[in-house]
């Protein structure tokens, strides 16, 4: 395993240096991604390979149409897309902990949980990015009223479709990396877990996540300083629950939902 971890560390350094260069990660995010990458290597090549493809796909989908998306969500969220440490850990820690516990046994509950967590993270990224670009005006998952693009808890048809495709994509990659058939129960339950985690992300985003108010524009936002340059005030949700906290919870829910979907009576191989 030591050899694999060293090789994995080498690959992780190379990948995170490139990611930093293309502003996918900031310096703290680079350290976080390095740690997650090394731990995934310790869990085994199939897990590390799954993580690399997830990471490249997530970066590509975030990069795609970035100026348009930044302009649309400017009032709600910071236009800076570079991921920092807490964002990286929130999206990767459940995956890597479960993957390490599963190691060479991907169809154990730990393996299914690991893939479910990563599927949830990717489904949420796909829903946000594709929904912002192609979705019409988002509606609150809770009240069904229209909300500003980029505000947590808003859903669109395009984003929801992207979440399902995104979850299935990660499920298929994890299966292929482990030599599991694409028509297997593994792919089905991991997809279900990913979609459930993404749904939970929206629900938590609409309820407990901190939301702020700009008194100048009379608009909800997640920004501390609004584009109008007014300082916003905390107005709803739990103050310390930001997007990273919600992402962490959503990946945990993705893991649990995938395992739950297996069902008690279906013996795992
Ligand atoms: Zn304002």
Image (cartoon, rainbow, N blue to C red):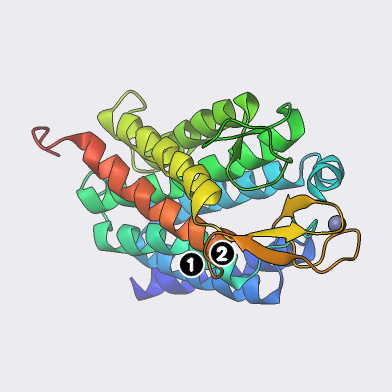
Image quadrant occupied by the N terminus: bottom left
Q: Nearer the viewer, residue 49 or 99?
A: 99
Q: Secondary structure at mark 2?
A: helix
Residue lying at the far right of the rendered structure: 228
- Residue 29 vs 108, above or below: the answer is below
For ligand 1, which image quadrant applies? bottom right
Q: Residue at coordinates 77% horizontally, 50% vertically from top-left?
A: 219
- Residue labelled 2 has its Cβ within 8 Å of some atom of ligand 1: no
Residue 126 position by quadrant: top right
- Residue 13 vs 260, above or below: the answer is below
- Where residue 72 appears, x then y in whole percent? 82, 42
Compared across the picture, whether 242 is left or right of 213 comes to: left
Q: Secondary structure at mark 1?
A: helix
Callout 1–callout 2 Cβ contact below 8 Å = yes
Image quadrant occupied by the C terminus: top left
Crowd tier of the residue under label 1, counting other residues whose Cα lies within 10 Å: few below 14, some 14–19, many 20 or above: many
Q: Kindly identify which numbered label has been placed on residue 254.
A: none
Residue 237 position by quadrant: bottom right
- Residue 241 vs 69, above or below: the answer is below
- Residue labelled 1 has its Cβ within 8 Å of some atom of ligand 1: no
| Residue 81 seen in this snapshot | no
Frontmost of labels 1 and 2 is 2
| Residue 89 seen in this snapshot | yes
Pointer 1: what residue?
A: 36
Q: Residue at coordinates 39% horizontally, 34% vertically from top-left?
A: 191
Q: Nearer the viewer, residue 215 or 123?
A: 215
Q: Residue at coordinates 36% horizontally, 59% vertically from top-left?
A: 44
Pointer 2: what residue?
A: 88
């Amino acid at each position: 395993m030591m050899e694999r971890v060293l090789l994995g560390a080498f690959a992780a350094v190379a990948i995170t240096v490139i990611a930093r260069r293309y502003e996918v990660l900031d310096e703290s995010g680079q350290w976080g991604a390095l740690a997650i990458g090394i731990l995934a290597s310790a869990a085994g090549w199939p897990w590390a390979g799954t993580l690399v493809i997830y990471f490249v796909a997530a970066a590509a989908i975030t990069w795609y149409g970035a100026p348009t998306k930044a302009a649309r969500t400017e009032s709600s969220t910071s236009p800076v897309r570079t991921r920092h440490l807490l964002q990286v850990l929130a999206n990767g820690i459940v995956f890597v902990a479960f993957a390490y516990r599963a190691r060479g046994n991907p169809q154990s509950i730990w393996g299914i949980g690991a893939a479910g967590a990563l599927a949830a993270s990717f489904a949420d990224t796909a829903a946000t990015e594709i929904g912002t670009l192609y979705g019409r005006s988002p509606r609150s998952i809770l009240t069904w009223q229209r909300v500003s693009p980029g505000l947590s808890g808003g859903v669109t048809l395009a984003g929801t479709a992207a979440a399902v495709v995104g979850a299935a994509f990660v499920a298929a990659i994890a299966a292929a990396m482990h030599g599991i058939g694409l028509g297997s129960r593994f792919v089905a339950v991991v997809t279900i877990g990913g979609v459930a985690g993404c749904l939970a992300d929206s629900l938590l985003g609409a309820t407990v996540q901190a939301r702020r108010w700009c008194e100048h524009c009379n608009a909800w936002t997640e920004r501390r300083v609004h584009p109008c340059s007014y300082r916003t005030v905390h107005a709803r949700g739990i103050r310390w629950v930001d997007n990273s906290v919600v992402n962490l919870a959503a990946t945990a829910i993705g893991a649990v939902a995938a395992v739950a979907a297996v069902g008690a009576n279906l013996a795992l191989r």
